[in-house]
Image (cartoon, grey):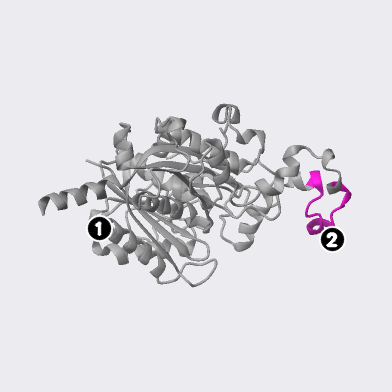
Amino acid sequence: MATTAGATYQIEHDRQAVITGLGVVSPIGCGRENFADALYAGTSGIDTITLFDASSYPTTFAGEVKDFDPNLLLAGARVTQDTRERRILFAVAAARLAVADAALPPAMLQEQRTAVVLGSGVHPVIPDPDMVMKTGMYAALFNDAMPDPGKFSDAAAMDGETRRYPIYNRVSAGALAVAHEYSLRGRCSTIISACAAATQAIGMAAKMIQRGEADIALCGGYDSMVFNFGVYAFCLLGLMSTQNDHPSQAMKPFDKRRDGFALGEGAGILVLESAAHARRRGARTYARIAGYGSSVDAYKVTDPHPDGSGAVIAMREALRDAAMEPGAIHYINAHGTATPKNDRIETKAIKEVFGEQAYRIPVSSTKSMIGHLMAAGGALELIACVLGMEHGFLPPTINYEEPDPDCDLDYVPNRARDCAYRTALSNSFGLGGQNATLIVQKEN
């Protein structure tokens, strides 16, 4: 009996999904060390928009990726031959950083045993304004006239990127570009669940490994809504902060003065491996994906359910999946969007799940530094958890000055806190009521 139990334990352990590589493209730095340093310093990556003229918009700031150097991060990459679409370049660059961080030889990325699972934003029906001007596409939206068919009939007059734009603007383009980069022919999936997309992608990739369907997974998310129509759409929804005079201080999660978020852009990719595969190649492991939970509010497209029930279900499902009691969680990376409703309801949900222990668990929103990266956010927030455990600090919630009586937890205000911990929970709650929670645990 003992032998059987021991064998069962070994099989279960071998199939655990462990994190061996981290790839970051973010408004506060590219690469895991730059990202970790900026998190610890409480650096804000939010500033006045430079990618287009937003001066007439209600919100004029965002978290742009400013130090992205394709010549450095994408040297020799296949994708650069096909597109200059920012979000796709972010995805491939983050994947390359993650694979390098994992010290994983590309030849080891087996054709059919490596999965790609990425969260993606809904790529705009209206493309890059430069493409609109170049091709006349969607002209009817601007001047009530149909596009000139002559602009499409002479393909030779268009450069290659222009002809391929509708293809590279589809939602699966980032995952396919990553698969193409490494000639992967296994499972390749794109998750489109708004702000929960990256978290769901990581959770689903971990399940693939646990079920024995893959040995390695490149997973996470990528997005950029920092373009004219993207920013305009969120301004119309009334979800964005309008404190334009001080962009770096505008996003104030859990603060009484909060008035909405700043959009961000970037990508976060993790290399997951089965514990057995990582052990065979002598890989360093950061942590394991211990639990994953998901739910839907079935309430409103733009608002979370007032009682926080969807968030409660996702967190409880993650704890159940991890076979953990609430007291096992040492840190929570909140969804924390700095909207009046989200922060109050998320706080309520955390207290519902953790009871009195909620007051003893540090909670912070790294969105205060990087903005809301939509489909990419959950990946970078989980990476923040992993790096916090790796380096022994709790990421702060910056711009927190005036407590809200409805948000009364420990939000790690303004400065990172030195702290050794082993288990973290990360929440992502998407538009439409899609909720996802991940739990990561660092091995002893």
Residue 86 image offset from top left, x and y in percent: 62, 41
Q: Please indicate whether residue 423 sits to the left or right of residue 61 in the image.
A: left
Q: Which of marks 1 and 2 is in front?
A: 1
- What amino acid type should be assigned to the residue bearing mark 2? Asp
**In terms of sequence position, does the residue under pointer 1 or pointer 2 come before the other?**
2
C-alpha gap between disc 1 and disc 2 = 58 Å
| In the image, residue 202 above or below residue 389 | below
Q: Are marks 1 and 2 in contact (CB under 8 Å)?
A: no
Residue 146 falls inside the magenta stretch: yes
Q: Which residue is drawn at 32% across and 63% down?
A: 316
Indicate the secondary structure of the residue bearing disc 1.
loop
Q: Residue at x 64, y 51 (%)?
A: 170
Residue 103 image offset from top left, x and y in percent: 40, 30
Say which of 78 and 251 sits in front: 78
Residue 323: mark:
1
Q: Which residue is drawn at 31% across and 45% down?
A: 288
Say which of 318 and 368 sits in front: 318
Region rendered in magenta? 133-151
| In the image, residue 101 above or below residue 201 | above
Q: Please indicate whether residue 424 sits to the left or right of residue 430 in the image.
A: left
Residue 144: mark:
2
Indicate the secondary structure of the residue bearing disc 2.
loop
Residue 106: mark:
none
Give the class, few, some or many, for how many residues have Cα within 10 Å of label 1's Cα (few <14, many ≥20).
Answer: few
Residue 239 image offset from top left, x and y in percent: 56, 60
- What amino acid type should be assigned to the residue bearing mark 1? Ala
Q: Is residue 393 visible?
A: no
Q: In what quadrant of the picture does the N terminus appear?
A: bottom left
Residue 253 falls inside the magenta stretch: no
